[in-house]
Image (spheres, rainbow, N blue to C red):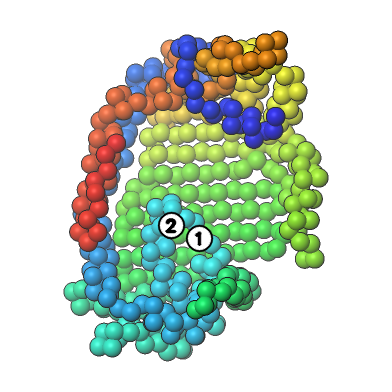
Amino acid sequence: MTLLLLCTMTFTACKDKNEVTNNDSNSSSNNSANAMTADQQKEYLENSGKQILATFKTVDQKEAVELADGLYRKYESYDWESIGEDLAQIDDGRYDNFFAMPGRLARFANGEQVPTARDILVFSFAECAYNFEVDEAKRTIRYSKSVDGTCTATFRDELGNTCVLKAWGEGAAKEYEYSYESTNRDGSKTTKTIQAQIPATTHMVLMQGKTEVINCAFGLDALKNDHIYVTFNLKVTNVAILFDTRVNSTHATALYEFSYGDQKLIAATADLPKYKLIDKQDNQDWEEWIEQYEDRYEELLRAIGAGYSTLNLMNLVNIKASISDGGLLYSEVVAWDERGNRNTKESVKNFCDIFNKYMYGAVFFPSDPATEQMLVKLQPRSYEGYQYNPETDDYEETTCYEPEPVIYFPKDKSSYAFEDYFTSERFNTILTLTENLINSYIDLDNEFDLGHVEF
């Protein structure tokens, strides 16, 4: 059984036969007397959720949504395909990313995608710094080479306000290369390669008259087989997102923050477990590189070290997770697997003990940062299943066991499966408030007649 199968087994959802058992053996809290009961924590979490949701004010984003809807109504009838074919002649398609950037930024903000190398290459200003202006009389776009190294697009909104989308670079530039597949008129494919000088930081701002709607800064520093650092700052009206990731051959860190006005709602950090990466040589094809990894699979897994992560929600709830030694965890899981009899209660309990020994997850309330309010553990769960009996050469119904992640409350030593604690009945108020908030934002958009969500 592979490690992937073991992990799949861990999180398989089956119907319980018995109630989840209580287990206080692995709690590391020295202050369980100060912790809240499961019911008290439900009330605390509900009140915290109300405070977080109350931060959002639909009216704050009304003008930005109206701007987007107005631009769609005003320019939807333009022949963008022919305009695109004309602009494609100047920069091998970089313009396409430039004009698509506001939409891509919205998808970044929604978590639907992450920035890629091509998002940066569009801003190789030494080669593709142009000024674009919508010609409303001819219903097309005029363009000219920029003299100041910036890239701008000028147009008018539905009310006649002048809007300017401007991008520029700062800091020392590095050379990068990006290849992509382009579709020709006859349907054939052509591979194109863009070589670009990318500044250390790329800035982009969208102004509607004198009002700043979007402000973005994207930093990139990469050295082959050594490191890649990416920073991403995005502000849309009064919503701000910060993302910072740093990866080298043995270590990776990540930082994420989400703010609304002057209130930081989410702050997350991760110091990922140490690892080993194998360099890919210039003359080595991908198959050889993958084979090299396969040959050293065991070695690389046993080299995984310690790591941790944190998530802070508006300084009301703080979640911590860690792994003390990934290599030892892997070794003990392999040894457990080799012993066989994996579906017995005792065997599954041993598997859970291994994970609980090296993996840690807990919830703290910042008002009492030394007290573990909840712990996440693995423990056995029973279900009715079928097991092969070699004596009868048939599958027979029997009681089986599998690991299940549960929430453990040190105060009253109770455990709940996630779906048993976070139910719609228990947290109905929060679900209703969340539903109402989402629908209030949907109501801002009058152009696309989006339907309401319902939980």
In the displayed structure, does residue 194 sit left or right of residue 149?
Answer: right
Report crowding for label 2: few under 14, some 14 to 19, many 20 or more residues within 10 A (C-alpha): some
At 67% from the left and 48% from the top, the residue drawn is: 251
Examine the image and state in which quarter residue 427 appears: top left
From the image, which quarter does the N terminus lie in? top right
At a point 50% along the width and 64% down the height, the residue shown is 218
- Vertical comparison of 188 with 437: above or below: below
| Residue drawn at x 73%, y 38% as measured from the top left | 301
Q: Nearer the viewer, residue 83 or 270?
A: 83
Residue closest to the eye, 454 or 45: 454
- Asked whether the residues under the numbered discs 2 and 1 touch, taking CB atoms below 8 Å apart as contact, a structural biologist would say yes
**Residue position for label 2:** 108
Residue assigned mark 1: 115
Name which quarter of the figure residue 66 lies in.
bottom left
The mark found on residue 46 in the picture is none
**Label 2, label 1: how many angstroms apart (C-alpha)?**
7 Å
- Where residue 350 sits in the image (x, y, percent)? 66, 17
- Give how far across and how far down residue 416 sits, in percent: 44, 19
